[in-house]
Amino acid sequence: MAPQLLEIMYKCMHNSCYVNCREGILTVEEGRFKELSSPTEEGVFKSPRGICRMGFSQPFKVVKMQVLGSGVPFDSGVSQLDPSQNPLLILVEEHKMINGKLEKIEEQLKKRDLDALWVSTRELENELVLHSGIKEEEVLFGLTKGLLPFGETLQDIIKEEHREIITLLHNFREAIEIGEINDGIIDSVIVSLRGHIRKEDQEFFEIIDKCLNDDIRLKITEGMNAVAEKFVRAEPGVRRMNLKQLSKQENYHDEVMALREAGCDTCCGH
């Protein structure tokens, strides 16, 4: 059974917070929220790893909270097409599949299974490139250009979120290549991707759907099917130690130690 997800509008309670996490919205599992909640102060919880850009957990105040799934996700009520022909409903179904992959990754994280994570994150990367980068950005956005109110602005927001998630996922895989599991990065991938999916299912797709007729819907579906047939998935391959990346990491640690020693020499007067 999939974990129950909560969408939380929060406000950071740290007085010197100036790094874009003073307030916002995040998605978190109900069980995880209970772990993070303060036992002494109701409505306050610690921020999950990867949320605060300062790199530290901060006290967050719950402004508003709802259980995802209690609202009504996007559902086309005007199209006469079969759901298998409706591009937006197809994308919603693909979101469910992507959420299933996130659950799989979370289980592998608990087991600290590097080889399994190497494969599953490549699978997720393939799905995101095809689903987000090609089907949505190239086909959907291309064929609805000029139809949406504030269309370019909305599409730019969605594209930027796609870039951020893919970049984080790539950084996580780089860490795996040197035998490390970067929990902060993968936590950010999971939180950001779930929030992004919710935004598309319950807000963005509804805006798009109101601007389409069935002729355009069919063209979009045909375009998505065509790019899916041509898409070549990248194979994960065997996970090997990336010596170049490892060397870069070791050099970084050496530089940090040298700076620490230099600082100590300066402050101690030696």
Image (tube, rainbow, N blue to C red):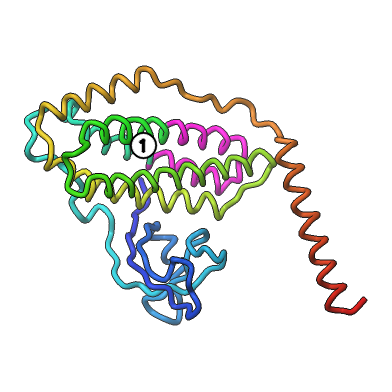
Q: Could you say which quadrant of the image residue 143 lies in?
A: top left
Compared across the picture, whether 200 is left or right of 10 comes to left
Task: Identify the residue at horizontal 38%, vertical 69% (top origin).
Answer: 23
Q: Which residues are magenta?
A: 99-126
Main SS category, magenta section = helix
* Residue 206: x %, y % from top left: 17, 46
Compared across the picture, whether 65 is left or right of 237 comes to left
119 inside magenta stretch: yes
* Residue 89: x %, y % from top left: 21, 35
Depth check: 176 or 35 in front?
176
76 inside magenta stretch: no
Depth check: 105 or 141 in front?
141
Task: Identify the residue at horizontal 50%, vertical 72% (top origin).
Answer: 58
**Residue type at the position of mark 1:** Ser
Q: Could you say which quadrant of the image residue 84 lies in?
A: top left
Residue that badge 1 annotates: 132
Task: Identify the residue at horizontal 73%, vertical 44% (top origin).
Answer: 248
135 over 75 or under it: above or below: above
* Residue 196: x %, y % from top left: 34, 49
- Where is the N terminus found, in terms of image quarters? top left
Task: Identify the residue at horizontal 43%, vertical 38% (top origin).
Answer: 101
